[in-house]
Amino acid sequence: MITLQDVDAVITPYKSQPMLSPGDASNLSYKLIELLMEGSCEREVLRALSSLFSTDTYEQLVQERVINHHCGYPLCGVVDPQKIYHKVQKNPLVAKLKLPGAYKTSYCTQQHYQGSEFYKKQLSPEAIWARTDVVNLDVNPKDQYYTFLLEDVLDNSDRVPRNSMDTLQQSLDELRLSVTQQSGVDHNDIKIKEHDASEL
């Protein structure tokens, strides 16, 4: 299991820089993905890395874990080459559709899919090199990059106010897969072009 000490060893060379250059940010992201793609990590690690992950970086991590037949959720240690596999989708429009059961090729359970999406939706899309003073493992709930894990929310559900649980349930409902729901597909982008008979 990957611990904070393992991550600290990776980020130590970058700690002295208040802002990373684009090259250093890319290199650090690569090293973090390399560290996390082959095993599970502690909750504290995922929380601490929220300041060093953008949504794109996290999606790359999930994709690398799936290519290696690991459950896409970094907290999970399940390896199953028969169930979890990287399916190359040739049509990018079809790849963006959220089809029922599509999560099964990337996650061992629906709960891990939901936990992963819950985490990803809280991550900033801002590039790592554009962030200041983020190369550390300090976890502060007041930090703008702080994220909650679904497991923490569910573990403390008896202490969470009812309206917060309703909000959480609504968020989870949005993560559920349905045939009618699509992700990132804008049909207005599809253009039909007719050719002149004279052009043929």
Image (tube, rainbow, N blue to C red):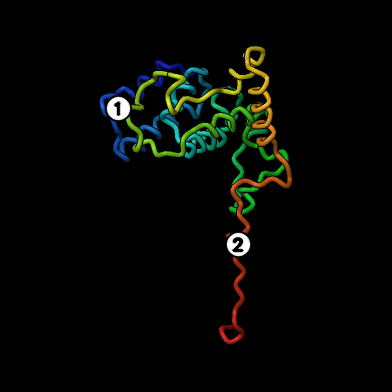
In the drawing, what numbered circle is on residue 62? none
Q: Is residue 139 left or right of residue 19?
A: right
Looking at the image, the residue that sits furthest to the left is: 16
Q: Is residue 40 at all visible to an observer of this figure? A: yes
Q: Nearer the viewer, mark 1 or mark 2?
A: 2
Label 1 Cα crowd, 10 Å radius (few <14 / some 14-19 / many 20+): some
Q: Are dots 1 and 2 in contact, CB under 8 Å?
A: no
In the drawing, what numbered circle is on residue 14? 1
Looking at the image, the residue that sits furthest to the bottom is: 198
Residue under label 2, please give it: 190
Asked if residue 112 is positioned above or below residue 96 in the image, the reply reads above
Q: Residue at x 68, y 40 (%)?
A: 102
Q: 36 or 148, which is in the foreground? A: 148
Rendered-image quadrant of the C terminus: bottom right
Tag 2, which secondary structure?
Answer: loop
Q: Residue at x 69, y 45 (%)?
A: 181
Number of numbered discs present?
2
Label 2 Cα crowd, 10 Å radius (few <14 / some 14-19 / many 20+): few
Q: Residue at x 28, y 29 (%)?
A: 18
Query: Which residue type does callout 2 highlight?
Result: Ile
Q: Quadrant of residue 120?
A: top right
Q: Position of residue 12 (x, y in %)?
A: 31, 22
Q: 76 or 149, which is in the foreground? A: 149
Q: Is residue 179 left or right of residue 57?
A: right
Query: What is the distance, in whole Å, between disc 1 and disc 2 at their CAs?
Result: 43 Å
Q: Position of residue 166 (x, y in %)?
A: 68, 26
Q: Is residue 70 at all visible to an observer of this figure? A: no
Which of pointers 1 and 2 lies earlier in the amino acid sequence?
A: 1
Q: Position of residue 54 (x, y in %)?
A: 45, 35
Q: Quadrant of residue 192?
A: bottom right
Query: Which residue type does callout 1 highlight?
Result: Tyr
Tag 1, which secondary structure?
Answer: helix
